[in-house]
Amino acid sequence: MINGKKIAVLCTTQLHDIENNRFTYILSEYLKKEDFCLWIYNMSTSEYWREDAVSAESAVFDTIDLSKTDIIIFMYEKIQSPLIASRVIENAKAHSVPVIVVDGKYEDCVSVAYDYAKGFEELVRHIVCQHGVRDLYFLGGEKGNPFSDEREDIFRRVLEENGIAVDDSIFGYG
């Protein structure tokens, strides 16, 4: 807290991206109404789950002044690094600062998750059921990514429910 205002810290990446910028603006406006100041700790890139190659710019999260911070909002899906997330969360816990993790789950943290699956399932069902498309190809993100795997499972299920043959030749990643 500074001068009677609570401090919310946002840990994110790619603030220059329009969607990230829009989210940050809306969050900031909401927090103002709740008598918070928003401090933003941002990296220009994300780590894409590469734990062996965590970039030097991630050290920005080590500069959070936890003695003044009232809450941390950690954008897990944007930063994409369990190592960085664990480091920030452990530091926050050591100072009794609560953490909200967006699109991730960590013990003793509040988790906020978007329902990406429902929208994707509706899209696939619309293409198959409304437009009658039977010859489909699934291009997913990185194999092993929880969101890509979830979308692949949905795609398989919807096709099977609609009598469309499913084999590995209709799946790609990248």
Image (cartoon, rainbow, N blue to C red):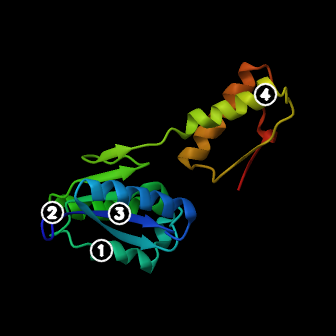
Query: Which residue lies at the image location 35% right of the left edge and 51% below the top edge?
Result: 101
> Label 4 sits on what residue type?
Val
Q: Position of residue 124 (x, y in %)?
A: 71, 33
- Residue under pointer 1: 62
> Label 2 sits on what residue type?
His
Closest to the camera, between mark 4 and mark 1, is: 4
Mark 1 vs mark 2: which is more N-terminal? 1
SS at badge 4: helix
Q: CA distance from mark 3 to mark 2?
A: 17 Å
SS at badge 1: helix
Mark 4 vs mark 3: which is more N-terminal? 3
User: Badge 2, how many Cα within 10 Å: few under 14, some, many 20+?
Assistant: few
In the image, which disc is placed on residue 128? 4
Closest to the camera, between mark 4 and mark 3, is: 3
Mark 2 vs mark 4: which is more N-terminal? 2
CB-based contact (under 8 Å), mark 3 and mark 1: no
Q: Is residue 128 above or below residue 100?
A: above
Q: CA distance from mark 4 to mark 1?
A: 48 Å
Q: CA distance from mark 4 to mark 3?
A: 40 Å
